[in-house]
């Protein structure tokens, strides 16, 4: 299972390659994106720690954070995440990328402090102490070089990403992050009644807070980079310059950027914010936006006229005198899931499909005859359709999985491909570049270039962009590992085994693609993997590669089945418990929310709990000044995500039916899932929405600010209020929801009278 052994030697070589200065004493933090510890809950220090490649999916913790004792050379690994969570990415996407971000690999500094100070989730953590370059996505739900790189509006005005608890103590469940680096575990916070920290986070923070050190260097790497450093000799692997580099080479790159007119001032050898901005501008001008990765590797260095030395010839980078761009004090922490009330968060996660509704049983599979255990129904296959973006989003997900198999640099004498890096063989790289390449060229190839080769030569040539994602993953894996022709042949044979009659010619064209929607998708995928498994078992060196082959096949089955199940959830109705309107839990919760809103809206209002009425003081909400595109997009996103869980068919109550859990036509107008979710709650939610709309108007802002801290909605109100123009959008929807609820009650009354 182990792909890399993380040690002080490996970290030292990786730091030297990037020109990162590390102290001779104390504790250094590091993060590895796309690598998971083999023993996630054994967080002790040792000379080396085993870890394996992991495809991060923004849902589960699939990264490693670590601590490195400089005096002893010992390291400890902790499961966590260096990427934001999907809920935050979806929210930011609807607002043009504002809020959530992905940190660029580099050298940073953090110091002891409090994360979410003044809030119920506040806990001791490590606060950002220097500038951090981040990507923001607005076009899709992942990050690539087409996304905007945020440099901040000035040297001290930028994002505030900390190292903190993930708020979850199980790596398989989820995590909370809008861009911060998080460690698995629960914090000691007022929200938890100051109970002790749990999980790996407790070990992480106890170790750091148990020393006299208050400031920590943080090095962020990728798994691919460490794999290359691990397997390539120092006499071959060349140094690079990126954010956080320091020393003579960084100064040479700065001098060249000054000559190009991209950088102003005197080069100082500390590659910080302005140097990174200049490098990215140069790369965009020379190679296009899609190649501007902010790293001065061999291609960029050649364009700048800079010679990159190998690690063996690289000097020790000098320690910077201080952060090049000190953070402005008082910058607010980025809002994330922890700013929502638990009940509201649960509803949002369920609505966005990130977790099932509370107490909802799993929808049974209706597929018949499947021998591969996918759990996806034949009826649900229509929703598993080719993506609208040409498959780029699906490619990123599939490539994240395939890269676990391919690893970094290798030169296995039993491998006929010879020197290989990221799965790209020397011959393939030479054909891509149009000239002969050396082993050193293969070793120093960037992962971004490898991805472009994979997308062009394997994904696109196998027509994976025109397939449903789970099928594309199976076909793409075969193309990468066995060749494009075998991938096409296996797909065509699998289709024919499931009722099609396509030519098995090793090319995926219109005939083959046209047969896909008519075939049982889980069975086709399973048959492709079976054919692939059989080919691997027939390999002449199967015994030598057996463990890796078997792990790859098993992982492929697991990931395609998971992908099928996720897509299936979008078309199958999700059963939910029938909660009658008189349910005391629901009634009490609605009562609490309404009274909290009334108190926040008008501190002088008189409220009475129980069945009696609530009488607020008379107020006149301020007229909205118009909605913004961002607010409308946020609302539209939520509605679209809700709609993905609907079956689209209203439930008609049969005549003289006594069933209590069947929706009336009014309540089932938008489908079973949403109808049952809102059944008995529409009127109450409508009233809450009307009050919340009034609360979010400028006239009510003063009253809300004074009581938000003590209100049950105190954490939700500031988050909603931060969305400009939300109140004018909420008001008509809330009124419509109230009216819908009243119609539903009338419909129920009439039908009950007919029973």
Image: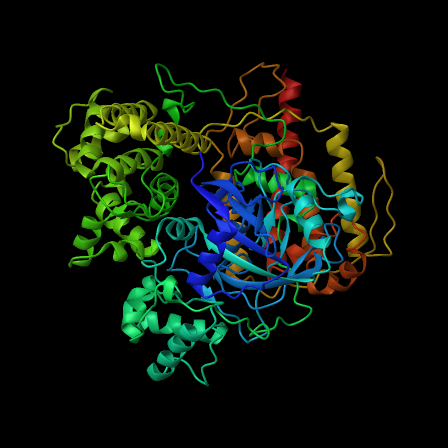
The percent position of residue 544, horizontal first and vertical second, equals 30, 29
Nearest to the observer: residue 621 or residue 163? 163
> As drawn, is 284 to the left or to the right of 366?
left
The percent position of residue 508, horizontal first and vertical second, equals 18, 36
Residue in the image at 45% along x and 66% along y: 19
Give the position of the N terminus as an image quadrant. top left
Q: Residue furthest bottom?
A: 265
For residue 153, say whether it is visible. yes
For residue 94, say whether it is visible. no
> As drawn, is 414 to the left or to the right of 406?
left
The percent position of residue 440, horizontal first and vertical second, equals 27, 57
Question: Looking at the image, what colour scheme do you see?
Answer: rainbow
Residue in the image at 33% along x and 81% along y: 260
The percent position of residue 158, horizontal first and vertical second, equals 57, 68
Give the position of the C terminus as an image quadrant. top right
Residue in the image at 45% along x and 82% along y: 267
> As drawn, is 320 to the left or to the right of 271?
right
> As drawn, is 751 to the left or to the right of 502?
right
Q: Is residue 695 above or below residue 517?
A: below
Nearest to the observer: residue 577 or residue 369? 369
Q: Is residue 453 above or below residue 283?
A: above
- In the picture, residue 433 is in which quadrant? bottom left
Nearest to the observer: residue 628 or residue 479? 479
- In the picture, residue 618 is in which quadrant? bottom right
Nearest to the observer: residue 359 or residue 427? 427
């Amino acid at each position: 299972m182990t792909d890399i052994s993380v040690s002080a030697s490996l970290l030292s070589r990786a730091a030297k390659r990037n020109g990162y200065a590390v102290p001779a004493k104390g504790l250094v933090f590091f993060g590895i994106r796309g690598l998971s510890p083999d023993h996630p809950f054994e967080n002790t220090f040792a000379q080396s720690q085993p870890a394996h490649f992991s495809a991060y999916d923004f849902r589960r913790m699939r990264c490693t954070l670590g601590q490195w004792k400089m005096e002893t050379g010992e390291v400890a690994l902790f499961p966590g995440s260096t990427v934001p969570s999907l809920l935050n990415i979806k929210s930011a996407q609807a607002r043009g990328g504002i809020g959530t971000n992905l940190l660029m690999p580099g050298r940073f500094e953090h110091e002891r402090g409090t994360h979410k100070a003044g809030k119920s989730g506040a806990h001791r953590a490590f606060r950002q102490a220097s500038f951090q370059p981040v990507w923001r996505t607005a076009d899709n739900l992942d990050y690539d070089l087409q996304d905007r790189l945020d440099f901040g509006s000035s040297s001290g005005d930028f994002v505030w990403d900390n190292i903190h608890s993930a708020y979850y103590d199980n790596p398989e469940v989820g995590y909370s992050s809008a861009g911060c680096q998080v460690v698995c575990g629960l914090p000691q916070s007022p929200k938890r009644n100051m109970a002790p920290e749990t999980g790996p986070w407790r070990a992480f923070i106890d170790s750091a807070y148990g020393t006299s050190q208050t400031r920590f260097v943080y090095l962020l790497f990728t798994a691919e980079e460490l794999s290359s450093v691990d397997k390539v000799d120092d006499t071959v692997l060349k140094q690079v310059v990126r954010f956080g580099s320091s020393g003579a080479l960084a100064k040479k790159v700065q001098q060249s950027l000054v000559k190009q007119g991209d950088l102003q001032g005197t080069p100082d050898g500390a590659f910080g914010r302005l140097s990174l901005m200049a490098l990215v501008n140069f790369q965009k001008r020379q190679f296009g936006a899609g190649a501007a990765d902010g790293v001065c590797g061999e291609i960029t260095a050649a364009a700048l006229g800079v010679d990159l030395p190998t690690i063996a010839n690289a000097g020790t980078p000098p320690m910077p005198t201080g952060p090049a761009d000190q953070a402005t004090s008082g910058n607010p922490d980025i809002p994330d899931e922890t700013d929502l009330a638990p009940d509201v968060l649960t509803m949002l996660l369920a609505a966005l499909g990130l977790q099932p509704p509370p107490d909802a049983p799993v929808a049974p599979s209706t597929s018949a005859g499947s021998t591969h255990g996918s759990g996806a129904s034949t009826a649900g296959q229509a929703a598993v359709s080719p993506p609208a973006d040409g498959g780029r989003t699906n490619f990123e997900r599939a490539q994240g999985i395939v890269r676990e198999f391919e690893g970094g640099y290798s030169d296995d004498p039993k491998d006929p491909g010879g020197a290989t890096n990221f799965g790209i063989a020397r011959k393939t790289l030479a054909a891509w570049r149009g000239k002969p390449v050396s082993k050193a060229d293969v070793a120093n190839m960037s992962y971004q270039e490898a991805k472009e080769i994979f997308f062009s030569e394997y994904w696109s040539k196998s027509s994976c962009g025109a397939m449903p994602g789970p099928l594309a993953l199976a076909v793409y894996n075969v193309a990468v590992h066995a060749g494009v022709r075998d991938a096409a042949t296996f797909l065509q044979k699998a289709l024919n085994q499931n009722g099609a009659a396509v030519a098995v010619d090793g090319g995926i064209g219109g005939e083959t693609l046209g047969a896909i929607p008519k075939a049982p998708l889980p069975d086709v995928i399973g048959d492709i993997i079976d054919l692939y498994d059989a080919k691997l078992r027939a390999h002449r060196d199967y015994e030598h590669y057996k463990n890796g082959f078997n792990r790859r096949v098993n992982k492929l089955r697991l990931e395609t089945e998971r992908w099928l199940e996720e897509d299936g959830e979008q078309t199958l109705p999700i059963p939910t418990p029938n909660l009658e309107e008189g349910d005391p839990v629901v009634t009490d919760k609605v009562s609490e929310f309404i009274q909290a809103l009334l108190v926040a809206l008008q501190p002088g209002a008189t409220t009475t709990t129980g069945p009696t009425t609530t009488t607020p003081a008379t107020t006149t909400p301020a007229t909205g000044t118009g909605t913004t595109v961002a607010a409308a997009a946020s609302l539209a996103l939520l509605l679209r995500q809700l709609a993905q869980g609907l079956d689209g068919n209203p439930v008609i109550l049969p005549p003289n039916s006594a069933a209590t859990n069947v929706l009336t036509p009014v309540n089932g107008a938008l489908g079973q899932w949403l109808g049952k979710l809102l059944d008995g709650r529409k009127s109450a939610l409508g009233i809450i929405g009307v009050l919340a709309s009034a609360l979010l108007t400028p006239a009510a802002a003063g009253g809300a600010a004074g009581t938000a801290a003590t209100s049950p909605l105190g954490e939700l109100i500031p988050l909603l209020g931060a969305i400009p123009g939300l109140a004018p959008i909420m008001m008509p929807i809330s009124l419509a929801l109230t009216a819908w609820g009243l119609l539903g009650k009338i419909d129920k009354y009439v039908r009950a009278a007919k029973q």
